Image (tube, rainbow, N blue to C red):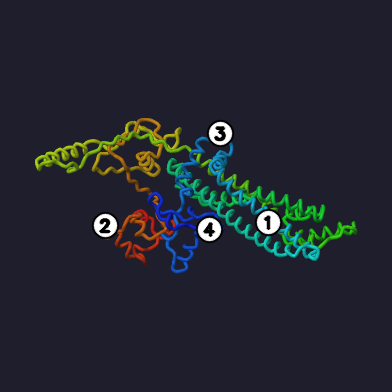
Amino acid sequence: MLLLFVESLPNQSHCIISGGRATSPEGFSGFFGKSLLLWLNPLFLRGYRRKLLVDDLYPIDDELASAKLTESLSGAWARTAPQRSRRLAWSLAKVFVGPLFLVQLPRFGLVAFAIAQPLLISAALDYVQRHASLPSSFGPAFIGAFALNYIAVAVSTVWSQHLTFRMLTMVRGALIGMIYKHSLLLHASDSNGGADAVSLISADVERILQTLQWVLNILPNVAQVAIGFYILYGRIGIVFVAPLIIAIGNTPAMLTPAATFAAFAITQSADPWNQFEVSNAFTSLALLSIMINPIAELVTATTNIISALSCLDRIQVFLQKTILADGRQIQLREVEPPGSHSHSSEKDRDEALSLSTLNMQGAESRPVVRITNASFGYNAELPILRDINMEVLPSKVVMVFGPVASGKSTLLRSLMGETHILAGKLECLSVKQTAYCDQEPWLLNQSIRQNILAFQVYNAERYERAIRACQLEKDFAQLPGGDETLTGSKGVSLSVGGRGQE
């Protein structure tokens, strides 16, 4: 037994590298190591000695990787018939049927050990009343039985909670991954600036996960309540329905034992021959204590499930929105810069330089964008712009003028492929990527400097050059914290012009 325990401890030498990257020691822990959470002890000791950093945390294993889970859920979503009711719910069930089954195993074990406690109490009370006629070894045996029972309850709880939260993490990663991935493929008019996706991720997904914890407990709770009522019926008879009525009536749980024994006293007064023993009283109290919470969860489960299904329906509607179909004709014409090839002589390099210069000069005469008799709209029926013809030449400044709501922004979004091309054609020649500055800037709730850097490494010379080019020195001088001033949510700390400059 000792060798089995030692073998189950995590082997730190195996936790360093797996396929060239670090892995969590959880994957190398045995049954005892996972049951007692021994693989977390090194992390706790490290946190006791000093402050924990992000790098101190164990890496997430592959089963919890959002990219892999998103791909699996996307595949199940694609294989499920679009016209099927609760399509997303069925897709989730197909992907996570394995983790769902694993969660039930320790949960049903916990039910068995919980039901065993009232039976042990009854047997122990019978032993106390008749210990003179029973072997003396029964006493230590009861002590050992209670100890094993509570240890089993603790271990089952650890496994149940651990597997439950692993499954919740997997479902969260898959749903958020699908929502995020789909939001990148929608038309600008359908994405609502990303607000729909954020609302689904922050509110609906969390509501689904909260309800999923209840759903995972439905079958174990039904089993626990059914077995508990069966045993309680054998102890106090038909009075066992009293706690059920109290739970359904949403009466405080503390009144359940009192109401149950009051009902039993009333029935006993009609049958004086029915004696109520001490063992029955304590056993009934123990049974009631393990049934109160499961009954309450089952009573409220219906409303929670309906709410979660509504959240799934909203996510499903979002995932069924038509994705962006880029109608642009993209034709890349690569122009090699001078000196891109190695040549054997200086004469060859000079000839290559002259040829590249001629190619660049020739490329300047070709448009990078050409629109021919095109009509654009945000849906396939109603065009916003009609019969547009234009060319954009390289190294030229093109300005689009027009009154308010004349379609200037629609034209720019069309150049990025954000609208439907209802007629004509739009050709992107020699343009691989397009930079776009929206009139509604997207700002992080961080400092102005962090927004300007945009996740890049700080380069003082380049940063100062950008500040001077945008003439932000005077603006920074008026702010109390300079470029370290927080922008606030959606840039509320800045003026409208300052948001655009940033």
Nearer the viewer's eye, disc 1 or disc 3? Answer: 1
Separation of disc 4 and disc 1 at Cα?
Answer: 30 Å
Q: Is residue 440 above or below residue 336?
A: below
Nearer the viewer's eye, disc 2 or disc 1? Answer: 1
> Residue 3 has which mark?
4
Whichever of callouts 1 and 3 sits on the residue coming sooner in the sequence is 3
- Which residue bears the numbered disc 1? 114
Query: For this rendering, which residue is in front, 44 or 410?
Result: 44
Place of residue 132 in the rendered image (x, y in percent of width and height, measured from the top left): 80, 66
Please, what is the three-letter code of the amino acid marked with disc 1?
Ala
Separation of disc 2 and disc 3 at Cα?
Answer: 54 Å
Separation of disc 4 and disc 2 at Cα?
Answer: 62 Å
Q: Residue at x 46, y 57 (%)?
A: 11
Residue furthest bottom in the image: 49
- Which residue bears the numbered disc 3? 83
Q: Residue at x 48, y 40 (%)?
A: 74
Please, what is the three-letter code of the amino acid marked with disc 3?
Gln
Whichever of callouts 4 and 1 sits on the residue coming sooner in the sequence is 4
Disc 3 element: loop
Contact between marks 4 and 2 (CB within 8 A): the answer is: no
Q: Is residue 38 above or below residue 81?
A: below
